[in-house]
Amino acid sequence: MSEQNCLVTNDWICAEYLRSRSQELTEATVQHVWITVVSVLIGLAVALPLALLARRSKRFAGPVLGLTTVLYTVPSLAMFSLLLPLFGLSSALVITGLVLYSLTILVRNILAGLEAVPQETREAARGMGYGPGRMLWEVELPLALPALLAGVRIATVSTIALTTVGSIVGRGGLGNLIEDALPTFFKAQVLAASVLCVLLAVVADLLLLGLQRLLTPWTRAGGAEPEPRTARIRRPTAAVGAG
């Protein structure tokens, strides 16, 4: 009886709310995860060619980095308002906005990772007959993974937070529950949705950190992990020089 009364007394912690609204919470969480994953993946697909363009020439680097930085400074409400005529009140509106916000983080991290690849590694790859495309996919991107995945982690956590703003068009995942609860200040719903947002961010960051450690074992301090296969192309160059 006391658990049911917590809905009447509008307590912050209410087990009855979690039981009676479990389906609503699940649907909102699934929508939140879906929007976040799609936004980050599309952002990564757009950021990679932009980073390659910025690396190609300083003439392109300034405009690319400048534009992505300006986009990140646009307030979310203004961003969605500008995109509204193009996408209407849809998930595409929210996803497009989130993709644009993710670009400044992803482009800079990908560019930093690519620029950190040792020049001698590139020269060794060219000496072994690697063309530009093969060098990018088999040498540069693998060695740039630590910085790239660090950017993905930051962008993912940021996107999880920004997804809640999509509630203004009814596509905000857990943000919808928060917005619905604010007019009546339904404490249990506000707390539950907020805690789930935080948990999503923590879980996503831990999962991506695990993926990063799995894909880049050579970055673990003090470990006896083998170096990446692509890094070994430096050795033939040293052997030839020694000869």
Image (cartoon, rainbow, N blue to C red):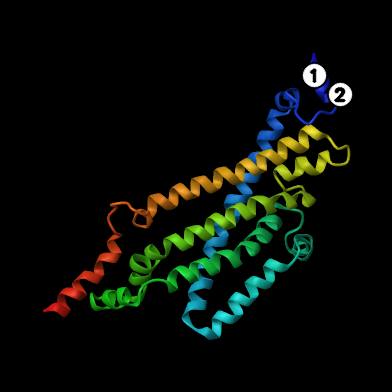
Residue at x 48%, y 62% (from the top left corner): 148
- Residue at the front extreme, as displayed: 222
Give x and y (percent) for residue 137.
37, 66
Q: Which mark is residue 80?
A: none
Q: Is residue 130 left or right of residue 192?
A: left
Residue at x 58%, y 53% (from the top left corner): 156
Q: Report the front residue among 16 and 46.
A: 16
- Residue at the left extreme, as displayed: 243
Give x and y (percent) for residue 239.
15, 74
Secondary structure beneath label 1:
helix
Give x and y (percent) for residue 236.
19, 72
Q: Is residue 31 left or right of residue 52?
A: right
Secondary structure beneath label 2:
helix
Q: Amino acid at mark 1?
A: Gln
Q: Amino acid at mark 2?
A: Val
* Residue, disc 1: 4
Residue at x 80%, y 13% (from the top left corner): 1
**Mark 1 and mark 2 residues within 8 Å of each other at the beta carbon:** yes
Q: Report the front residue among 197 and 129.
A: 197
| Crowdedness near tag 1: few (<14), some (14–19) or many (≥20) residues, C-alpha within 10 Å | few
Q: Is residue 90 left or right of residue 230?
A: right
Q: Report the front residue among 26 and 62.
A: 62
Give the tally of numbered discs.
Answer: 2
Q: Which mark is residue 8?
A: 2
